[in-house]
Amino acid sequence: MSTKVDPIAFLNGLRATRDFTADPVPDAALADILEVVRRSGSAMNLQPWHVVVVRDRAMLARLGAIGGNCGHVAKAPLALALIMDGKVEQFDTYDEGRLSERIMLAAEAHGLGSCIGWYGDPADAAAAKAALAVPQDRTFRTIISIGTPAPQAPSTASSPIRRKTLAEIVSHEQFGA
């Protein structure tokens, strides 16, 4: 018997996971996630991405140590590096964000945790590109760690997640109204 999942609750339940167990990501889950990558929409349907699947522990540790907010990569059994074609920066930026969220939702659909990391400093991005032999004309700044979430410490498991109220983030008809 199948249990229907409330899609809004599913979307609202997505959280960043920064600590993982050592369990590998199942091949079937990875195949589904990569199929979501393949089918993701993009500006003008350019699909300006190439994804590097990283499972090697030494490479995950190296990418996690480079900088940015990517330390969680070193703790994950798998990471997906999003390499953008670098031809139209505004499209790359839009598509990179859209693709990142879809990857994280696909991982969540398999009961896996994920976290987005970003090499925002140009020196960090260059080091990450060099580590994965990314061509110079491509853009690499986003990496997503994926794995089975580690059990949370009791003090953090019950901590409320602070979100702004709708009144703080939504206006109707005009800004601030």
Image (cartoon, rainbow, N blue to C red):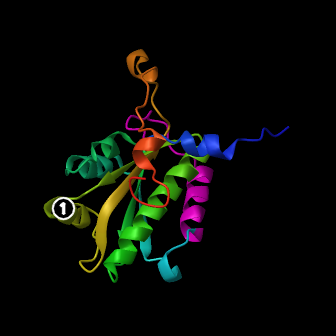
| Residue 81 appears in view | yes
Q: Quick check: is 17 in the magenta stretch?
A: yes
Q: Nearer the viewer, residue 81 or 15?
A: 15
Q: For the residue labelled by badge 1, is the local secondary structure a helix, a strand or a loop?
A: helix
**Residue displayed at 27% across by 77% down:** 135
Q: Position of residue 126 (x, y in %)?
A: 19, 66
Quarter of the image for the N terminus: give it.
top right
Q: Quick check: is 28 in the magenta stretch?
A: yes
Q: Position of residue 88 (x, y in %)?
A: 34, 82
**Residue displayed at 48% across by 78% down:** 43
- Determine the residue located farthest toward the right in the rendered image: 1
Q: Quadrant of residue 52?
A: bottom left
- Determine the residue located farthest toward the front in the rendered image: 177
Q: Position of residue 115 (x, y in %)?
A: 40, 46
Query: Which span is picked out in magenta?
Result: 16-39
Return the residue at label 1.
Answer: 127
**Residue displayed at 81% across by 40% down:** 2
Q: Residues within 10 Å of mark 1 (few under 14, many from 20)?
A: some
| Residue 46 appears in view | no
Q: Give the amino acid at mark 1.
A: Ala
**Residue displayed at 37% across by 73% down:** 92
Left or right position of 175 against 40: left
Q: Position of residue 38 (x, y in %)?
A: 56, 70
In the rendered view, tell whether residue 54 sits above or below residue 159. Answer: below
